[in-house]
Amino acid sequence: MNIDLSKMVTEKRNSNTKDIDKVSTLEMVKKINCEDKLVACAVEKELPQIAEAIDKIADAMNNGGRLIYCGAGTSGRLGILDASECPPTYGVSSELVQGIIAGGIEAIFKAKEGAEDSKELCVEDLNNMNFTNKDVLVGIAASGRTPYVIGGLEYANSIGAVTVGVTCNPQSEIASVAKIAISPVVGPEVITGSTRMKAGTAQKMVLNMLSTGAMVRTGKVYGNLMVDVKATNEKLVERAKHIVMEATEVDREKAEAVLEETNYDVKLSILMIMANLSKEEGKELLEKNNGYIAKALSK
C-alpha cells in the first residue's frame, strides 16, 4: 500500500524547528514548549465532539456497556494508560475501561511496528474480549490511517456499537469511519513525524476528558471529589480521609471513625455523615439512587 505522507499534517516538516540541532539547549526546549502551547487550543476546538462522545460513553456504561480503546504504538499505550487509572481513581472494575494495542502485551513495552498493518488483528482482539454493541470503541491514531484501528472501527460499526475516532489529521480515514470524530490538529511535530510529542499530548488530553467525563456522568464524583476511590495503599487511605473531611467538614477523628465502620467506603461514609444515617440506611439510599450522592441527599 502506497502512503503519501506529504498530505498528512502530522508528517509535514515544522518550519519553526528546522534549526533545532543548532541552537542552545535552552533555545531548544523553548521551541518545544512553544509548540506544546498549541495543543490545548487544538483540543479546545474539538470540545463539542468530545462532549458528545462522553454522553454516549456514560449512556453505554449505565446500560451495561464498556469503554474500549484501541490503537497502535504510542496511541495504543495511551489508551491502556488511561484505562489502567480508572479502577484506583474511581473504584470501577478493570473490565469497565480497557485498552487493546496492536501486537498485544509485548507491544506496550517494546515497539512492534508491523502489527498495526492488520485490520483483522483488531477484530480478533475485540472478539477475544467479547466486544458487543453495548460497548463503545474509541480508535486512536495520530495519522488517522492505521489499519488496525480502522479494522476495529469498521467491525464495531457493523455490529451497531458507538464508535469514536481520535486523530490529529483532519479528513482522515479514521475520522470518516468513526461515528464521532475528534480531530485536534496540532500541526507538524517538533521532530518531523514524531507523533509521540504534540499528537500524543493531544490524544492524552482527549482521553483524560473522555474517561473523566464518563465517570462524572455516572456518579463517580461528588463535586470534584473522587468519592469512589479505593484506599489500596497508604497514600489513598489518607486521600480517603481528606475527601470525607472536605465533603462533610468533619474533623479527622470523625472521618476516620466512619471510614473504619464502612471499610473505607468513601461515598457511603460521606452520605452517612451528611444525612445522619446508619450504615444500612446509607447503603439502601445509595442503591436507590444508583450511587449518586447528590441525588441521595436531595431526597
Image (cartoon, rainbow, N blue to C red):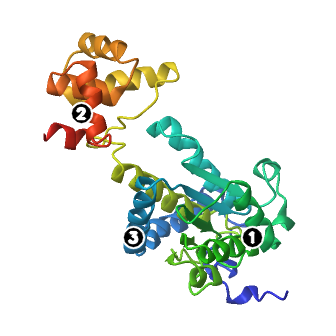
* Number of residue marks: 3
Disc 2 target residue? 285
Residue in view at x 20 percent, y 22 percent = 273
Separation of disc 3 and disc 1 at Cα?
24 Å
Can you tell which of label 2 and label 1 is closer to the viewer? 2
Q: Earlier in the sequence, mark 3 or mark 1?
A: 3
Tag shown at residue 97:
none
- Name above or below for residue 283 compared with residue 175: above
- Name above or below for residue 191 compared with residue 286: below
* Whole-percent x, y for residue 228 in the image: 39, 35
Residue in view at x 60 percent, y 82 percent = 177
Q: Earlier in the sequence, mark 3 or mark 2?
A: 3
Asked whether, in this view, residue 260 is left or right of residue 120, the answer is: left
Disc 1 target residue? 148
* Whole-percent x, y for residue 25 in the image: 65, 56
Q: Nearer the viewer, residue 259 or 239?
A: 259
Question: Which quarter shows the C terminus?
Answer: top left
Element at badge 3?
Answer: helix
Residue in view at x 47 percent, y 23 percent = 235
- What amino acid type should be assigned to the residue bearing mark 3? Glu
Q: Earlier in the sequence, mark 2 or mark 1?
A: 1
Circle 3 packing at 10 Å, graded few (<14), some (14-19), many (20+), is: few
Disc 3 target residue? 52
Can you tell which of label 3 and label 2 is closer to the viewer? 2
Question: Which quarter shows the N terminus?
Answer: bottom right
Circles 2 and 1: CB atoms closer than 8 Å: no
